[in-house]
Image (cartoon, grey):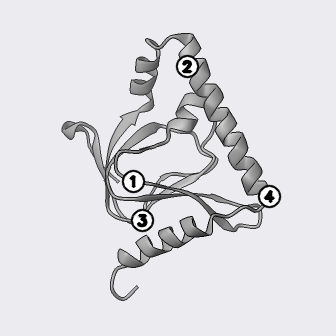
Amino acid sequence: MADNSNQNNIVSIEPGEFIIREKTNSDALYIIKEGQLEVYRTTNNGEKVTIGLISSGQFAGETALLTGRQNTSNVVALTPVKAIKLPRASIEAQLKGVPSWLLGLTKGLIERLSGANDILRRNGWVDESLAQMVKAVEEKHKKPGT
């Protein structure tokens, strides 16, 4: 992943490249300018379960940054991606000016959403239409001969 710090922290991410991996600490928040990324978790049996798509205008990495926990999902580029990478220190500096009640509310909502996702995953829920969308994007951007 190229980090062009002199260009407003814009990074280029190639298809197949991870920006976030499960069970790692978060070092940045990404604001997606172009492209699509897949969000997935790996089950205890090693099975990949797609839990989301991230597209232009959306974020990646906010959950771990705001909760201080490790990343719970993998985020991998499906297409060429351009994103603004905001390092942890920048986010933390901005959060110092946020009222504590608002920060608490945000963290609480994130915890609830994460808990709901965990319940769905543990019960084997898979969104087939989401999995089909990911497959379609992968096929569309597949390099010839692969």
Location of the N terminus by quadrant is bottom left
Q: Residue 30's x, y, as percent?
A: 40, 42
Where residue 12 sits, quadrant-wise, is bottom left
Q: Residue 17's x, y, as percent?
A: 43, 61
Q: Is residue 140 left or right of residue 19?
A: left
Q: Give the secondary structure at mark 1.
A: loop
Q: CA distance from mark 4 to mark 2?
A: 31 Å
Nearer-N-terminus badge (2/3): 3
Are the residues flagged by discs 4 and 2 in contact, CB closer than 8 Å? no
Q: CA distance from mark 4 to mark 1?
A: 27 Å
Nearer-N-terminus badge (3/1): 1
Q: Mark 4 highlights which residue?
A: 123
Q: Mark 1 highlights which residue?
A: 55
Q: Give the secondary structure at mark 4.
A: loop
Q: Residue furthest right?
A: 123
Classify 70 as above or below 96.
below
Q: Mark 3 highlights which residue?
A: 78
Q: Residue at x 39, y 53 (%)?
A: 55
Q: Mark 2 highlights which residue?
A: 103
Q: Give the secondary structure at mark 3.
A: loop
